Structures are given as structure tokens and as C-alpha cells.
Image: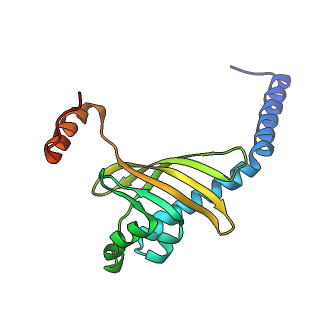
Amino acid sequence: MRFGAGARLLIAAVLLARTGAAAAQSAEGMFAQGQVAAALDGFHAAAAAAEEEKYFSYLAPDAVFLGTDATERWTRDEFRKWAHPYFARGKAWTYKPRSRWIAFSPDRRTAWFDELLDNASLGTCRGSGVLVATSDGWKIEQYNLSIMVPNDAADAVVKTIRGAAGAAPAK
């Protein structure tokens, strides 16, 4: 399909206007989104490099880490105590972000996120949580790590979990 010069100018003007409006409208959001993403990327990179001090610096003092097991609900300090042996031997864990979504409270001081992660042992996982803006940068208040279970495999996985836990099915 061919467009005349007038139509091409109109299309270009609309595209420029939309691009300019989007950039003007979201510059602050883009900056904050970049800061949150950088904090999450740093968090994952510090674990992969077994940098314990740096890893835990991304967590707020009252942070909660929710692991993949139902028993894994830790404060920052409890999680650090559990994780210390992994960091001490120079090998913690590696989760590589594949995709990430970030949203903000109206005052842009709180961010919610979810991300898909790749892990050599567990496959595709999901991290989700909350960060808050502090004078020391964005800090993770809650991080929730989940193992993704395909819907087609859910029945078998639930059966395995119930068997391992000795739990009776819910009614």
C-alpha cells in the first residue's frame, strides 16, 4: 500500500506526538523503574557472585524472604543465617531474570514487581515482591520465590507434595 506525502507526514506527526507524550509522561517513572530494576539485578548478581554482604544490603532491615518451601518464611536476619554457609563456600545461587514487570504506588515510593527467572536446577521460577524507596536507595521489603508448575503437571505435583508432607487432601 502506498501513501501520499500528506499521509506520510500525518503518520509521522502522530508517531512523534505519541512518542514525545510517552517520554514526557513517563520520564520520572522510567527513572524509578530503572532504579528498581537495577536493585533487583544487583540482588541477583550478588547471589551469583556469592557476595553475602552486598546481597543482604538490598534487603530492608525488616524484610521478609519467602522461599519455595512452605516452611521458608524468614526475616532478613533469619534468611542470612540460613544462607551464610552457601555464601561462605563461595557458591550461593544463580537466578537469571528473563522478564520483569514493575508497578508503583501513586507517590512512587513503593514498587511491586514480578519477574520470571531461569535457574539451572529449578528451571523457570517467579520472583515477586515489594521494594520501598529509602535514603539508601530502593530496598526489598518482601521477596517471594516460587517454582512454576505447568497446569498439566499440577495434579501430579500436588499428589507428590501431599505424599511428602503426609497431608490429607483439603475438603
Q: Height in image: 40 above or below 124?
A: below
In the rendered image, which quarter is residue 73 located in? bottom left
Horizontal arrangement in the rendering, residue 7 relative to residue 57 (left or right): right
User: Where residue 109 sits in the image (x, y, percent)?
Assistant: 68, 53
Q: Observer-nearest residue: 132 or 61? A: 61
Q: Height in image: 125 above or below 3?
A: below
User: Where residue 37 sits in the image (x, y, percent)?
Assistant: 58, 56
Horizontal arrangement in the rendering, residue 77 relative to residue 69 (left or right): right
Q: Height in image: 117 above or below 87?
A: above
Q: Quadrant of the C terminus?
A: top left
Horizontal arrangement in the rendering, residue 36 relative to residue 41 (left or right): right
Q: Height in image: 35 above or below 171?
A: below
User: Where residue 168 sits in the image (x, y, percent)?
Assistant: 16, 36
> At 23% from the left edge and 31% from the top edge, which residue is drawn?
170
> At 47% from the left edge and 67% from the top edge, which residue is drawn?
45
User: Where residue 56 sits in the image (x, y, percent)?
Assistant: 48, 70
